[in-house]
Image (cartoon, rainbow, N blue to C red):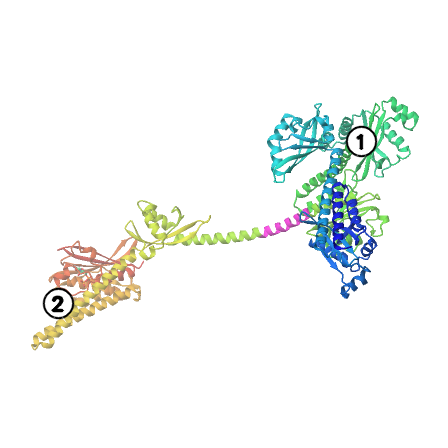
């Protein structure tokens, strides 16, 4: 065929195919026709159309035609082998571009490969992708054995056009097919279907919709969807549901409709918005499913549920059954009902609860119907309905009796709980009844409720007995815990075990090392009487029963000791036929065993063992507590002893401290942080009494502030109370309640202050006294060195001697003072005869008195008692006083020396008086004459040498010897000094 003819023919074919496309209703027919047209009487020996097969990942042919059709089948069969043709079709499908191969015989490689793999002798193979709307839907393949085909661009483009037309045909036919099946679906579907505009005006309604609303189908379009709704629903739809639908694009809700005859319809509405090409909502597609029936059923089920809830509160089985039977009758409009409970073997009805029918009738009905052929497995079949028992082939006699008793229709429903049968519910009707599916379903549902209730009741019963046991345990443990006395606890454990686990004898073994010994045993003699039996049995822990419990920590049961090879028969336990034991454990450690015994075989059961175990755990705890308590008591006794010892120690320490505090001369105060006075010692109390304005005088705010700041010690915390000076010291003191208090000590430092000032005075006095003679010495030494005149020299020398003497005297006196003060003078007190001492002294001084023209009189009495003094020091004192008298009395004066005895301060004294007729001492001078370095007017008048230390030394010496010195003087009348010395008793 020449090119032109080929093109022309091709053009004709494509026209024909296009006409076919417009008319065709089936894609497979169309495609087949197209392939046939292309290959009939043309140069194309094979044409086929393939669609993409994802699973096989190849172009799956849906139409093929041509002389070489066999070739296609062959390459498809041998798909494992390489096929250039199939590969091209896939490439076209995937790339969207035509794939054309000219198999040039001059290109042997390509040609040979083609021919050795597929035995094809095509000159040209071409695959054209079928485009539609940017997608490749399939591939049109055309193979030719004629060289020269598909070499012209027009030819190729005609084929590509054809391929695209076929794609369009595929789409439009598919759309048409879908439309058709949609129509069928909408026409036949059971749900109602409405298409409305966006305002809810109906444009289409399917037949189911008409039926549902009870309208002629033609009456619905044009009306509003809302017109089928009760007002409330209509408002809700307009205000909420329609906007929600338009907003979200779809919507699902339960709504209410009204049918033409006013019946309420509950429908489940699923609606979706249909959008125009430019995205504007144009239509609503509303699917309405009638759920009225289901709703009503739901209502009834809800009622049933409520009933179940109510039933769950009732635990009395009788009441329970009566309620449930009532409810079942009401639910199914039955006239009588009964329930029969089967035993665990599911063979016998052991319990019947019947309402308005006799127990026996129910039992017999079940039996009779079970005899019917095919009904034997009544307990396992879902339901047995007899709409008219007259028609059943059961015992005729029984049948007529039933009918006479008003039973005509029967429903027998097995009751199952989690797969196991519990019993059979019978519902009895006095009239002929038709049991439709819903009724049957309701009956079955009712039995479910019944099953649950029944199970609850059973659980309750077992729970009830469990609770009784729990109560017994609670009471028993209360008793156990009422005592902590180990001995009592042991008794109570056994007594209470007997209560919780009835038995003939009970004992407790305690583990000691590798054996267990019976520590306490009780035996029931009669119903009322329980006796304590001597225990003492000791078993090694290797005994099978004990070993097992030690290992598992669980109880053991030997229902019959005669059947139990593990049972070890002892002489004392030969009577035991049934035995149970539970280990007593504390923190996973077995400390003993609680054993119960009976002489009856099989007396104890698993339940007994469980109870025993439960009780044993309480008992172990009680035992443990009692032991702990015992240990605690021991400890607390120890503790008490220790506390007493410690208390005694503390109180001794406290007394000691108090005694010390009371005896210290310092005033000690304890204050709270708020300055409240808590305590004080004796000296403190005295000080407070002295303070005119009480504590505030001692603890002024300002003073306390300074004291607390810790600055006071440096500042010399000095307080003056009633003329005495106190130094205050403080330190903080922890008080109870985490408070901190303050201890303040006031020390009387008056004397120290005086001494201090005296010391200062003394130093200044001494330096003064020393300066005068030293100045004189230096002056006269100068004079002496320049003086040629002998007389003057003598006079100067005399002055120098006098001054030297004075200085010597001064130093002597100072040394004496210093020695006295530092206690470096030893006193040798002895009994002396004062008379003898005075006599010697007077003799000594008489020449001096004569020299000064003074009369020295000595009139001592006889029989003077002896004085207790140091004679040397006393001599020094008298000598001082006598020297003063001689110094400060004018010539012609009289000095009298006397001695006497006196009684003063309840003591016996020996006194020596030295009186003179001198100037006397001015009254204002009298208080000072005993002060160190004090020299009065007399000394100035007489110009007598002296240091002003004589009287001070004398007073000090006498004081040290237990004596004293006194003076009586009047100016112009002379003075009288008296020395007082302790008399020898
Ligand atoms: P001194 O005699 O060295 O001055 P004393 O201590 O012995 O020192 O005496 C102190 C003072 O007491 C004397 O300076 C004197 O004024 C006065 N005094 C002591 N004895 C007499 C006395 N017999 N008559 C008058 N005045 C006396």
Quadrant where the N terminus sits is: bottom right
In this view of the protein, which residue sits in the foreground, 18 or 378? 18
Q: Which residue is mark 2?
A: 851
For the point 29% across and 49% down, the residue is 722
Residue 564, magenta (yes or no): no
Furthest residue in direction right, as rendered: 396
Image spot of residue 96 (x, y percent):
69, 53
Please tell me whether mark 2 sits on a helix, a strand or a loop: helix
In this view of the protein, which residue sits in the foreground, 922 or 290? 290
The answer to whether one can see residue 353 in this image is: no
Quadrant where the C terminus sits is: bottom left
Image spot of residue 190 (x, y percent):
75, 33
- Whether disc 2's CB lies below 8 Å from ligand 1 is answered no
- Whether disc 1's CB lies below 8 Å from ligand 1 is answered no
Are dots 1 and 2 in contact, CB under 8 Å? no
837 relative position to 656: left or right: left
Residue at mark 1 to residue at mark 2: CA–CA distance: 171 Å
Furthest residue in direction bottom, as rendered: 788
For the point 77% across and 39% down, the residue is 529
In this view of the protein, which residue sits in the foreground, 30 or 174? 30
Q: Which residues are magenta?
A: 621-638
Report the image quarter containing ligand 1: bottom left
């Amino acid at each position: 065929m020449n090119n032109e003819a080929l093109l022309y023919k091709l053009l004709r074919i494509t026209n024909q195919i296009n006409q076919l496309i417009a008319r065709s209703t089936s894609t497979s027919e169309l495609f087949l026709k197209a392939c046939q047209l292309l290959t009939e009487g043309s140069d194309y020996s094979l044409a086929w159309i393939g669609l993409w097969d994802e699973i096989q990942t190849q172009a799956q042919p849906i139409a093929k035609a041509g002389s070489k059709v066999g070739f296609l089948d062959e390459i498809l069969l041998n798909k494992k082998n390489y096929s250039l043709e199939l590969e091209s079709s896939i490439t076209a499908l995937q790339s969207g571009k035509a794939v054309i191969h000219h198999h040039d015989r001059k290109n042997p490689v390509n040609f040979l490969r083609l021919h050795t793999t597929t035995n094809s002798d095509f000159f040209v193979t071409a695959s054209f992708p079928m485009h539609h709307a940017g997608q490749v839907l399939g591939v049109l393949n055309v193979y030719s054995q004629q060289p020269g085909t598909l070499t012209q661009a027009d030819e190729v483009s005609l084929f590509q056009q054809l391929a695209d037309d076929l794609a369009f045909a595929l789409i439009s036919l598919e759309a048409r097919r879908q439309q058709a099946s949609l129509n069928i679906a909408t026409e036949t579907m059971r749900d109602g279907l409405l298409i409305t505009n966006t305002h809810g005006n109906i444009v289409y309604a399917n037949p189911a919709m008409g039926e549902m609303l009870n309208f002629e189908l033609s009456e619905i379009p044009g009306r509003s969807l809302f017109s089928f709704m009760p007002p409330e629903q209509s408002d809700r739809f307009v205000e909420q549901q329609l906007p929600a639908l338009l907003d979200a694009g779809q919507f699902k809700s339960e709504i209410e409709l009204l049918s033409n005859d006013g019946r309420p319809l509950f429908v489940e509405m699923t609606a979706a918005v249909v959008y125009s090409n430019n995205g504007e909502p144009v239509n609503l597609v509303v699917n309405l499913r009638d759920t009225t029936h289901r709703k009503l059923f739901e209502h009834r089920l809800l009622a049933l549920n409520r009933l179940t809830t109510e039933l769950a509160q009732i635990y009395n089985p009788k009441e329970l059954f009566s309620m449930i039977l009532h409810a079942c009758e009401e639910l199914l409009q039955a006239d009588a009902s009964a329930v029969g409970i089967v035993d665990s073997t599911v063979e016998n009805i052991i319990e019947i609860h019947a309402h308005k029918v006799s127990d026996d009738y129910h039992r017999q009905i079940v039996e009779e119907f079970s005899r019917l052929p095919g009904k034997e497995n009544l307990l396992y079949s879902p339901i047995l309905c007899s709409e008219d028992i007259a028609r059943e082939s059961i015992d005729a006699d029984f049948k007529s009796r039933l009918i006479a008793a008003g039973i005509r229709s029967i429903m027998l429903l097995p009751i199952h709980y989690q797969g196991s049968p519990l019993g059979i519910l019978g519902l009895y009707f006095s009239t002929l009844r038709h049991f439709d599916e819903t009724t049957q379903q309701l009956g079955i549902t009712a039995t479910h409720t019944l099953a649950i209730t029944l199970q609850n009741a059973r659980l309750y019963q077992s729970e009830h007995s469990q609770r009784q046991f729990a109560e017994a345990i609670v009471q028993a443990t209360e008793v156990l815990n009422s005592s902590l006395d180990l001995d009592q606890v042991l008794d109570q454990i056994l007594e209470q075990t007997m209560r919780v686990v009835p038995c003939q004898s009970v004992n407790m073994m305690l583990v000691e090392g590798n054996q267990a010994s019976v520590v306490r045993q009780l035996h029931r003699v009669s119903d009322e009487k329980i006796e304590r039996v001597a225990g003492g049995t000791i078993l090694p822990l290797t005994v099978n029963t004990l070993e097992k419990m030690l290992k598992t920590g669980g109880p053991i049961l030997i229902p019959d000791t005669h059947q139990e090879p593990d049972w070890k028969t002892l002489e004392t336990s030969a009577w035991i036929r049934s035995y149970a034991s539970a280990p007593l454990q504390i923190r996973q450690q077995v400390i003993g065993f609680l054993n119960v015994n009976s002489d009856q075989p099989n007396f104890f059961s698993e339940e007994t063992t469980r109870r025993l175990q439960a009780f044993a755990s309480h008992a172990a705890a009680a035992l443990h507590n009692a032991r702990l308590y015992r240990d605690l008591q021991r400890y607390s006794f120890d503790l008490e002893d220790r506390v007493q010892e410690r208390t005694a120690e503390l109180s001794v320490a406290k007394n000691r401290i108090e005694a010390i505090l009371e005896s210290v001369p310092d005033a000690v105060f304890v204050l709270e942080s708020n300055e409240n006075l808590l305590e004080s010692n004796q000296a403190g109390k005295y000080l407070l009494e002295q303070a005119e304005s009480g504590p505030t005088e001692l603890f002024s705010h300002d003073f306390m502030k300074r004291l607390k700041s810790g600055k006071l010690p440096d500042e010399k915390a000095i307080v003056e109370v009633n003329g005495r000076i106190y130094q205050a010291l403080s330190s903080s003191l922890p008080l109870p309640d985490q408070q901190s208090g303050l201890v303040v000590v006031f020390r009387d430092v008056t004397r120290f202050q005086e001494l201090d000032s005296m010391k200062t005075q003394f130093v200044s006095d001494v330096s003064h006294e020393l300066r005068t003679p030293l100045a004189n010495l230096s002056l006269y030494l100068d004079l002496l060195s320049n003086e040629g005149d002998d007389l003057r020299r003598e006079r100067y020398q005399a002055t120098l001697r006098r001054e030297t003497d004075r200085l010597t005297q001064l130093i002597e006196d100072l040394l004496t003072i210093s020695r006295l003060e530092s206690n470096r003078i030893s006193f040798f007190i002895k009994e002396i005869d004062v008379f003898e001492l005075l006599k010697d002294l007077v003799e000594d001084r008489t020449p001096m008195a004569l020299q000064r023209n003074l009369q020295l009189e000595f009139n001592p009495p006889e029989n003077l008692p002896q004085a207790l003094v140091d004679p040397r020091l006393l001599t020094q004192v008298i000598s001082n006083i006598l020297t003063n008298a001689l110094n400060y009395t004018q010539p012609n004066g009289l000095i009298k020396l006397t001695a006497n005895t006196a009684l003063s301060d309840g003591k016996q004294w020996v006194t020596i008086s030295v009186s003179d007729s001198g100037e006397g001492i001015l009254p204002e001078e009298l208080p000072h004459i005993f002060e160190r370095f004090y020299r009065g007017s007399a000394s100035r008048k007489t110009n007598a040498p002296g240091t002003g230390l004589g009287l001070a030394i004398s007073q000090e010496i006498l004081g040290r010897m237990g004596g004293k010195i006194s003076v009586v003087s009047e100016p112009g009348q002379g003075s009288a000094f008296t020395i007082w010395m302790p008399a020898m008793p």
